[in-house]
Amino acid sequence: MLKEQYLLKAITEGDVSAFSQLFYAHHQQLGLYAFTVIRCQETAEEIVQDVFLKVWQHREKLAAVANIKAYLFTITKNETLNAIRKVANERKRRQAFENDLLDADSNLTVDLAEEENEVHQVFEHAVSSLPPQQQKVFLLRQQGLKYAQISVEMSISLHSAKKYQQLAMQSIERFLRAKAGIIILFFIFFLKK
């Protein structure tokens, strides 16, 4: 218990080595917990990374922590619940969007072959207008690579890979919304899957 207090005090003071000790002492248990709830290894690993990122960013709060294990599990539980909510919200949003598209589909009288070609051209233009790092991450994700693989291939952090993908998706969506109608929005729906 005394060792734990010294460790937390060191982390509070910005000791990276102490933080690494904390990470290696608890990351597997936290990952296993997140995995049992989420059932996705990649998401569980992301949750654990987010937990330790929050701990580091708010390390001054560690001085008031009596039980670090309970503290870490509480953050992990909350992050896991947030991940579940996020997935549920994305499903609802997709379903609502799909329903809107199905309603609008009956009103479409456009030649789909021409529209598909236009969509493809506009989409390619949107992708080509991205900054190089965002474009590369986006294209690698489209090829099926995971964030961890992308971060290794591009020599960037996992967080940077995710952030570049998020920014790329936002830029593409803004570009497509500005350039087109319902068919482009339909394409956005499938792009997010």
Image (tube, rainbow, N blue to C red):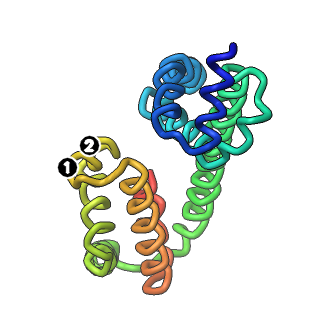
Q: Is residue 164 left or right of residue 66?
A: left
Residue positioned 35% across, 50% down in the render: 157
Separation (CA) of disc 2 from disc 1: 6 Å
Q: 35 or 62, which lies in front?
A: 62
Q: Amino acid at mark 2?
A: Gln
Residue 69 against residue 101 in the figure, above or below: above
Pinpoint residue 20: horizontal percent, then vertical percent: 46, 31
169 up-or-down from 22: above or below: below
**Which quadrant of the rendered structure holds the N terminus?**
top right
Q: Are marks 2 and 1 in contact (CB under 8 Å)?
A: yes
Residue 110 location in percent, x, y?
40, 79
Given residues 109 and 155, the one toward you in this image is 155
Residue shown at the point (40%, 68%) measured from the top left: 168
Pick whichever, 164 or 62, lies toward us: 62
- State the residue position of label 2: 149
Q: Residue furthest left?
A: 153
Give the number of callouts: 2
Is residue 184 in sight in this rendering? no
Q: Identify the residue at horizontal 65%, vertical 43% (top origin).
A: 59
Q: Which mark is residue 153?
A: 1
The answer to whether residue 10 of the structure is visible from this angle is yes
Amino acid type, label 1: Glu
Q: Residues within 10 Å of mark 2 (few under 14, many from 20)?
A: some
Q: What element does badge 2 sit on?
A: helix
